[in-house]
Image (spheres, helix red, strand yellow):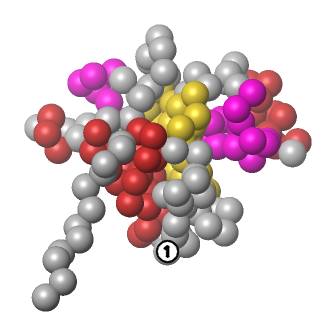
Amino acid sequence: MAHLREHSARYTVACPRTLVDDLDAALLVQARDVAARAYAPYSHFRVGATVRDAHGRVYVGCNVESVSYGLTICAERNAIFAALAAGASRPFSALAVTCLDASGPCMPCGACRQVMEEHLATDAPVYVGGGQRFTAAQLLPHAFKMEPHAE
Ligand SMILES: [Zn+2]
């Protein structure tokens, strides 16, 4: 945990009482690290996210904007998609998201909430920078599910 302490000293990440352990605190610290690599020349709103897979491996993502704004992708989906592309084991056990440029919590957008609901374990915590903890179902109750009728 020396690595975590080193990071914690470098940043003033709010580590709320709701964090389960140092591993979860480290997720927020890593999310803050990757936010510095965001490509956000238009909004200047840098976001980082981390996702932990079922085996405890951590994958990262940052927001990447496009001059054609609609093509922009959020940090949370980038982290989840990077994890899937790397062969991460589902369902994912935790996700953290933080923003370097927001005065308050950086709540996930609706699209990211839908993707989280699909790939995170039911009880997986979603940590939002600033200290709030949710589950994907709390963030998106009644999420879309494809349930074709039986024939
Ligand atoms: Zn989003």
Q: Nearer the viewer, residue 19 or 53?
A: 19
Find out whether residue 37 is within the magenta segment. yes
**Residue located at (23% from left, 71% from top):** 147
Mark 1: secondary structure: loop
* Residue at the extreme top: 103
The reply, left or right, for residue 72 in relation to residue 83 is left
Q: Is mark 1 within 8 Å of ligand 1?
A: no
Answer whether residue 118 is visible to the viewer in this image. Answer: yes
**Residue located at (35% from left, 54% from top):** 115
Q: What residue range appears in magenta? A: 17-44
Quadrant holding the N terminus: top right
Q: With respect to residue 104, does 5 lie above or below?
A: below
* Residue at the extreme bottom: 151
Find out whether residue 150 is within the magenta segment. no
How many marks the image carries: the answer is: 1
Q: With respect to residue 41, does 64 lie above or below?
A: below
Residue 125 pos. (x, y %)? 59, 45
Q: Which residue is mark 1?
A: 87
**Residue located at (24% from left, 24% from top):** 42
Q: Nearer the viewer, residue 118 or 12?
A: 118
Answer whether residue 36 is visible to the viewer in this image. Answer: no
At label 1, the amino acid type is: Gly
- Crowd class of label 1 (few under 14; some 14 to 19; many from 20; radius 10 Å): few
**Residue located at (79% from left, 42% from top):** 22
Q: With respect to residue 134, does 92 lie above or below?
A: below
Quarter where residue 138 is shown: top left
Quarter where residue 73 is shown: top left
The reply, left or right, for residue 90 in relation to residue 118 is right
Quadrant holding the C terminus: bottom left
